[in-house]
Amino acid sequence: MDAIWGAETGIIAGIQAIGDWLTLPATAVSALGGELFYLAALPLLLWCVNAGLGARLSVFLTAGAAVNALCTILAHAPRPYWYSVRVQPLAMATTFGLPTAQAQLPVTLWGYLALKTRWRWAVPAALAAAILIAFSGVYLGTHFLTAVLAGMALGVAALWLILRYETTVLAWWRGRALRAQVGLALAASLLAPLAAVAWQTVVHSQWSAPQAWTGGIPPEVTAASMERVFLVAGAMFGALAGLSVLAARGWYSAAGSLVSRAARYVIGITILVLFLVAFQMTVPDTQGILTPIRDYLCYAVVAGWISLGAPELFIALKLAQRPAETHPSPPPTPQQAPPS
């Protein structure tokens, strides 16, 4: 790959030479594919717009992020500004870069939304959004073109699998008891972390950055990449388990007045932010394997709050209610009209 990456660094350096005026818009567009965007957008969709759609996307995106994080561990590939001093680090990245999550997840998110809305302009708009988000990182020096293309290919593959098997998998999931659903959610969420640990132990136990990487390589790249695997795996478990419990309790409706929807979002996000701040302040920093376990537990709680805790609180506060026709399991299939 050195020959390909070497050629790409020249292309990226040429793109950056267009001018600094692109830095601000590229940074803004890039943020639409970042963690904070999903932490803000998925609760909005689930709590205030369409619970069924928000639930499905929460599962799809956390599972996709877990696959992506595992693939970065398998590849151990650099970011452009790590590889060559010719590329300016206009943004920072602390984890391995192939495939690019900022290319993969927007393809799945915007592609799914576009295909479900069936508006004439939705598909080209979704394609444009995914491309802009993906390639903003190329200008910023954090994504190789090959990493972007690999991420987009993964996103398209994930979208195809979702559209092909969503109904079958959801029907199968509904047939399981709640205890089995939670156990399966835990087992599925641990697949990526266990595979990552095994790969790192067997293949990359003595890894260090190659001499060909002459750029600014951040410290503890492997540890940061491993922590990301556990973090998104925890979010996947929290989302799957939380939604399963919520469905068993009668589900949740995002319908309501504009005031009630706004109140839900403000209350839910405020509690989420307070939890994250309190967690950082009260839970001590850990070393070794305890750090990724800490991240797993933290984001399992975060996703559990989004998928279960907040909806139940809104119902208790009379800001929301359960659908008139309850669902005995997770969100409805696309053939059914999801509860709003």
Image (cartoon, grey):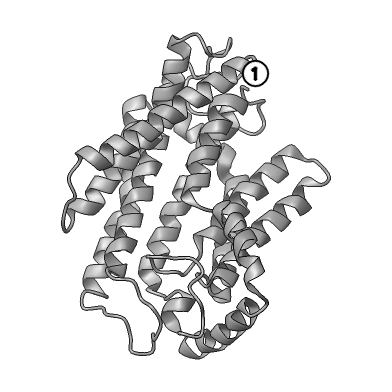
Q: Secondary structure beneath disc 1?
A: helix
Classify mark 1: residues with Cα within 10 Å, few (<14), some (14-19) or many (20+).
few
**Label 1 sits on what residue type?**
Leu
Q: How many marks?
A: 1
Taking depth in this image into account, of 166 and 257 the one nearest to the observer is: 257
Question: What residue is shown at x 38% (from left), y 89% (from top)?
Answer: 212
Residue 272 spot, x, y in % from top left: 39, 32
Q: Quadrant of the C terminus?
A: top right
Q: Is residue 217 above or below residue 84?
A: above
Q: Answer with the quarter of the image where residue 323 lies.
A: top right
Q: Answer with the quarter of the image where residue 18 lies.
A: bottom right
Residue 72 spot, x, y in % from top left: 40, 66
Taking depth in this image into account, of 56 and 46 the one nearest to the observer is: 46
Residue 153 spot, x, y in % from top left: 59, 64
Question: What residue is shown at x 51% (from left), y 38% (from top)?
Answer: 40
Taking depth in this image into account, of 6 and 181 the one nearest to the observer is: 6
Question: What residue is shown at x 65% (from left), y 67% (from top)?
Answer: 22
Q: Is residue 180 above or below residue 140?
A: above
**Which residue, given by chain and number where applicable, does mark 1 sit on?**
258
Q: Is residue 119 above or below residue 332?
A: below
